[in-house]
Amino acid sequence: MVHKSGRVKISKSLSANFMQVSKNFSDGAKVAYEYEYFNAAGVLIVHSAIALADALTIKLGGVKCKGENHYEIIGLLKDLSPDNLQRDSALKQLEAIISHKNAVSYSGSIYDKKDTDKLLKHLERFTSWGLTILQGLTL
């Protein structure tokens, strides 16, 4: 279980804002990808996934992680979402995306099409699961 001290309460109504931010980052990643700005696309993919994860934790529990350790959100999502194979797979996708955050942003690593394609695939899978969860809550 993740330490609750790394969480902040937030109104569930703000989940939609985080979803919009996630979509903006995702759309921006696609534009950057088209122009072969692969590191820029990678950064936007990472932030899209984090914003979606925040939208989910806010909608599910009225909380989000605070601080710079983005891996904490994986534990929070595990605590708040239904336990099943789809969740476990989706959280592995999120973890794979987060593991690229420093490399794509700060390390001087040059990302190419192949690297970005992998990140996009992870984002698609995580987003598909996340939207399924959110749609299930709005029924």
Image (cartoon, rainbow, N blue to C red):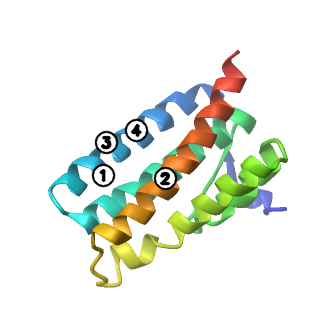
Q: Is residue 11 visible?
A: no
Residue labelled with disc 2: 123
Q: Earlier in the sequence, mark 2 or mark 4?
A: 4
Look at the numbered discs 4 and 3 and tell me whether their residues touch, using CB distance below 8 Å.
Answer: yes
Q: Is 67 situated left or right of 36 in this image?
A: right
Circle 1 packing at 10 Å, graded few (<14), some (14-19), many (20+), is many
Look at the numbered discs 3 and 1 and tell me whether their residues touch, using CB distance below 8 Å.
Answer: yes
Q: Earlier in the sequence, mark 2 or mark 3?
A: 3
Q: Residue 13, how many percent across, how many down?
A: 59, 25
Residue labelled with disc 4: 23
Q: Residue 61, how many percent across, how many down?
A: 75, 38
Q: Which residue is at the far bottom?
A: 108
Measured in 3D between alpha carbons, the distance from the residue under mark 2 to the one under mark 3, in whole angstroms, is 12 Å
Residue labelled with disc 1: 29
Residue type pointed to by label 4: Lys
- The residue positioned 30% from the left and 51% from the top of the image is 29
Residue type pointed to by label 2: Leu
Residue labelled with disc 3: 27
- The residue positioned 54% from the left and 43% from the top of the image is 127
Mark 2 falls on what kind of element?
A: helix
Q: Which residue is at the far left?
A: 35
Q: Is 100 situated left or right of 37 in this image?
A: right
Circle 4 packing at 10 Å, graded few (<14), some (14-19), many (20+), is some
